[in-house]
Amino acid sequence: MSKKHHLHYVLVADSSGSMADQIDEVRDELNIQIEKMRKESDTDTNPCTFTLRTFDSEVKNVHVNIPIEDVPKITQRDYETGGLTALFDAIGSTIESVGALLGNRIDGEKESLAMIIFSDGGENASRNYDCNKIEVLLDKYQNRPGFNIAFVGCDPASFQDMDRVRFSSENRIMFSRGEERHALQDVHASVSDLKFKRTKNFNFKKNN
């Protein structure tokens, strides 16, 4: 009998104005993936909880730590576009909230974290976190067992932001604008591997 492994999947999704042309496709793909995870979920051996946060000029909680089988369909009301890109605020506030909620439980054996930051732009609106604060948080968490934190983006400026905060180069994936669906499919494959402990770390098909 396989050992129980609980995956906490946290998605931090860009909802700034520049996402307007892609948002319908992104919502659709997220709903497809949640349904796949719901069907493959086994609450006895491989439970999964899901958190969705969106960010533009502000960071918003849509779903927080909900069992994957209970996650409702993501609607336009849940995830709509507008505003700037408070990327550092999104990263920093999410890491701190996850650390406070799950920090002592994540061990990579019984419980793991898959945190994805998905953005089509670079930092331009954060008020509470700067690159120094993000670097400190990443230094504290990103190399701990079971803490898998990845950045998925298409703007070279955002990857320069990740360089500034020393975000692990192994956990970055770059996609071209218009390929959001393919990027999210790659994310889903890696999250699924973590969920079933086929890997202990993200294994993206294409890293930057």
Image (cartoon, rainbow, N blue to C red):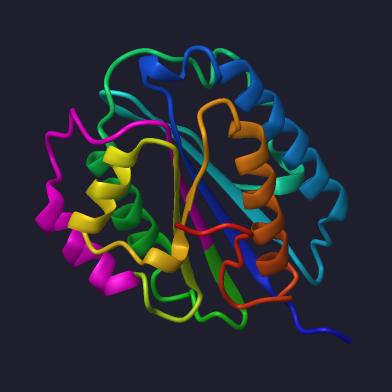
Residue drawn at the location 35% of the way across and 63% of the way down: 99
Q: Note whether residue 65 is visible.
A: no
Image quadrant where one finds the C terminus: bottom left
Image location (x, y in percent) of residue 70 = 73, 40
Q: Is residue 14 above or below residue 193?
A: above
The mark tally for this picture is 0
Q: Which quarter of the picture shows residue 1?
A: bottom right
Q: Is residue 161 above or below residue 195?
A: above
Image location (x, y in percent) of residue 200 = 60, 78
Q: Note whether residue 84 is visible.
A: yes
Q: Is residue 90 above or below residue 6?
A: above
Q: Is residue 163 magenta?
A: no
> Between residues 50 and 144, which one lies in front from this camera angle?
144
> Between residues 96 and 141, which one lies in front from this camera angle?
141
Image location (x, y in percent) of residue 86 = 25, 32
Residue drawn at the location 61% of the way across and 67% of the way down: 203
Q: Which quarter of the picture shows residue 179?
A: top right
Image location (x, y in percent) of residue 96 = 29, 56
> Between residues 169 and 66, which one lies in front from this camera angle?
169
Q: Is residue 139 magenta?
A: yes
Q: Which quarter of the picture shows residue 167?
A: bottom left
Start-end of magenta stretch: 114-141
Q: Is residue 66 above or below residue 8?
A: above
Residue drawn at the location 26% of the way across and 23% of the way down: 57
| Lateral position of residue 8 relative to residue 99, left or right | right
Residue drawn at the location 52% of the way across and 35% of the way down: 176
| Lateral position of residue 58 relative to residue 132, left or right | right
